[in-house]
Image (tube, grey):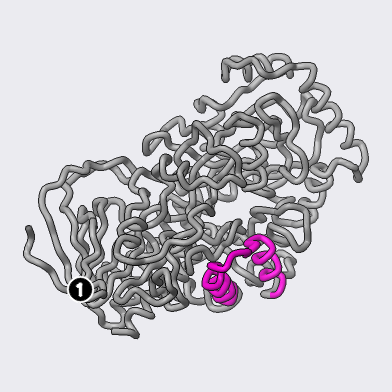
């Protein structure tokens, strides 16, 4: 066993929340050991792979685009989406209220002071279930980081490495925490195993060979270890009845090390986990043709025009349109008895409306290449999208509907689709495009979206008939369920202190990020408004880091 180390604080998990908390602690002169079971190449965790979207309220970027937003409207949207309905939602609700004030207040300024910058066009994510007081964003609020995920991580990695140089922070990679040390009812450190060095590329599964033990004593332990999305068995065990039966097959939106281990370890020490059945998984997942991790899935960030069909070719009902109601759509798809669905679209739609989530799928934004970004406004689909269309196993491209349906049936091997039935569905939709008004809710939503300048410029194709040869070729995309986020977690008060079952703090333990449901044990409630996962890590990491420093 290594000689025991001592620190003021041990931070468990070197993702975004852990980096933010460590930076805040070091700025206040605290000695921190930042431990992670992965190697240094994985610093930044899931945030590195993200698109970098941030939820902001009444920002200058919104105002420049004519968007009228307010804290009042954002609160209406958040509470309509969260649908808090449990006794244990006391702290999640308070965290949600605090986060909304942060997003409408100093969040943008705080990040900008550290060099963070935003793409000028604000995206309209998670457009909702069609009710003013229900789920969804009433206005565009999805602000894309210039530099995507790495651009989010960089300011905090820089601050942490500067603290390492000052002797305040020790980075302890390949240190897997297996136990919180309890002394007289208080947590006084961590114990675990050293894992063998493994130089695998970022994101790939690393060795779990144990080569030694370690123990670190501290006045406080701050858990920032993420959720359960990388362990599909855990996801299925937590899967709620309200979403139907868990899918037999899913693709992984996060690496394998997102394993939820620290939830069980902290619970064993006395911490309380609440809302474990609340989760956020996407319905527009693709199998990555060039995977980074096993079963690697990429999410399509869709515009509103693609026709969404279930596995048998039946159109999904309103409001289950692309980009509107993630969990409502998930529940509907699972209820069909199949774990996949289809987009049917045209080349014209894919060129304007398809984006792929992830830093590696957006090299122009990630690389801060202005010339490449300007190319998005010209003709043609982005290069990563075209690469998926050419190489991805989930794409079928054809000049006629008969050929398209034949290819779709060949892809699944199930023969569930009938060309004439699909033709009737598509023609009925196409017939609604002859006027500027329509009884078709999706067509109305498409036209409404183009009233927003940002959507008209780069996000929503001009409405057209899917069977118009000039808009072709036709494209079908098989969509998988893609695991992503844990919305429940360790219950924490507004200082980030982990609570016990009776509501009292577990002495010496704090939590932030996804392991705490991004604050309180689930500040999103049942639904996300998007751009709120990175933001939740930023806010809860900052809050917990400052709280720990003040308490020591």
Give percent across and percent down for residue 349.
70, 36
Q: Main secondary structure of the magenta part?
A: helix
Q: Position of residue 423 (x, y in %)?
A: 80, 21
Q: Nearer the viewer, residue 28 or 232?
A: 232
Figure check: 458 above or below 387: below
Q: Quadrant of residue 170?
A: bottom left
x, y (%) of residue 366?
A: 46, 52
Identify the residue at image location x=67%, y=41%. Answer: 352
| Tag count | 1
Give coordinates of residue 478: x percent, y percent. Answer: 59, 29
Residue 158, by quadrant, is bottom left
Question: Magenta stretch: residue 93 in it?
Answer: yes
What crowding class fits label 1: few (fewer than 14 Cα within 10 Å), some (14-19), or many (20 or more)? few
Q: Is residue 167 visible?
A: yes
Which is more toward the observer, 301 or 457? 301
Residue 478 versus residue 280 in the image, above or below: above
Left or right of 412 on screen, residue 8 = left
The N terminus sits in image quarter: bottom left
Quarter of the picture containing the C terminus is bottom left
One can see residue 473 in this view: no
Q: Which residue is disc 1 drawn over?
A: 183
Q: Is label 1 in a helix, a strand or a loop?
A: strand
Residue 421 is left or right of residue 198, and the answer is right
Q: Residue at x 70, y 54 (%)?
A: 127
Q: Nearer the viewer, residue 270 or 369?
A: 270
Residue 371 is one of the magenta-drawn residues: no
- In the image, the segment drawn in magenta is 72-101
Q: In the drawing, does residue 106 fall left or right of residue 269? A: right
Identify the image quadrant of residue 402: top right
């Amino acid at each position: 066993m290594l000689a025991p180390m001592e620190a003021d604080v041990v931070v468990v998990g070197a993702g975004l929340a852990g980096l933010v908390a460590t930076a805040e602690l070091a700025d206040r002169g605290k000695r921190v050991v930042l431990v992670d079971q992965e190697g240094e190449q994985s610093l930044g965790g899931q945030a590195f792979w993200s698109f970098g979207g941030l939820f902001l309220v009444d920002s200058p970027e919104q105002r420049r685009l004519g968007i009228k937003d307010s804290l009042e409207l954002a609160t209406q949207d958040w509470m309509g989406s969260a649908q808090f309905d449990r006794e244990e939602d006391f702290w999640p609700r308070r965290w949600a209220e605090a986060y909304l004030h942060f997003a409408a207040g100093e969040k943008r300024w705080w990040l900008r002071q550290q060099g963070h910058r935003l793409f000028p066009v604000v995206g309209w994510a998670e457009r909702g279930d069609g009710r003013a007081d229900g789920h969804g964003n009433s206005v565009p609020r999805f602000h894309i980081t210039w530099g995507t995920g790495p651009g989010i991580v960089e300011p905090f990695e820089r601050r942490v490495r500067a603290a390492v140089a000052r002797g305040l922070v020790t980075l302890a990679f390949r240190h897997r925490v297996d136990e919180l040390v309890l002394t007289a009812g208080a947590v006084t450190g961590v114990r675990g195993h050293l894992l063998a060095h493994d130089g695998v590329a970022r994101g790939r599964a690393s060795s779990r060979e144990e080569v030694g033990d370690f123990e670190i004593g501290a006045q406080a332990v701050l858990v920032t270890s993420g959720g359960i999305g990388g362990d599909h068995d855990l996801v299925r065990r937590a899967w709620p009845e309200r979403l139907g039966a868990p899918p037999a097959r899913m693709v992984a939106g996060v690496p394998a090390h997102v394993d939820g281990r620290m939830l069980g370890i902290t619970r064993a020490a006395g911490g309380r986990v609440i809302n474990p059945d609340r989760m956020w998984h996407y319905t527009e997942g693709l199998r990555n043709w060039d995977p980074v991790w096993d079963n690697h899935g990429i999410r399509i960030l869709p515009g509103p025009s693609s026709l969404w069909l279930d596995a048998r070719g039946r159109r999904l009902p309103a409001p289950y349109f692309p980009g509107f109601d993630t969990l409502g759509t998930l529940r509907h798809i699972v209820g069909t008895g199949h774990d996949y669905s289809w987009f049917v679209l045209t080349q014209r739609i894919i060129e304007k409306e398809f984006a792929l989530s992830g830093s590696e799928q957006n090299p122009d934004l990630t690389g801060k290449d202005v010339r490449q970004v300007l190319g998005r406004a010209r003709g043609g689909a982005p290069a990563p999208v075209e690469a998926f269309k050419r190489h991805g196993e989930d794409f079928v491209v054809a000049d006629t509907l008969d050929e398209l349906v034949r290819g779709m049936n060949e892809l699944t091997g199930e023969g569930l689709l009938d060309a004439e039935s699909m033709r009737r569905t598509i023609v009925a939709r196409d017939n609604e495009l002859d006027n500027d008004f329509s009884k078709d809710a999706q067509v109305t939503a498409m036209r409404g979206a183009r009233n927003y300048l940002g959507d008209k410029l780069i996000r929503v194709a001009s409405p057209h008939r899917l069977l118009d040869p000039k808009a072709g070729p036709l494209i079908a995309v098989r969509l998988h369920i893609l695991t992503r986020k844990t919305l429940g977690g360790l219950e924490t008060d507004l200082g980030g202190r982990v609570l016990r079952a009776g509501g009292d703090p577990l002495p010496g333990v704090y939590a932030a990020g996804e392991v705490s449901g991004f604050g309180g044990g689930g500040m999103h409630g049942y639904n996300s408004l998007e751009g709120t996962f990175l933001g939740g890590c930023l806010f809860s990491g900052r809050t917990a880091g400052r709280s720990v420093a003040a308490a020591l």
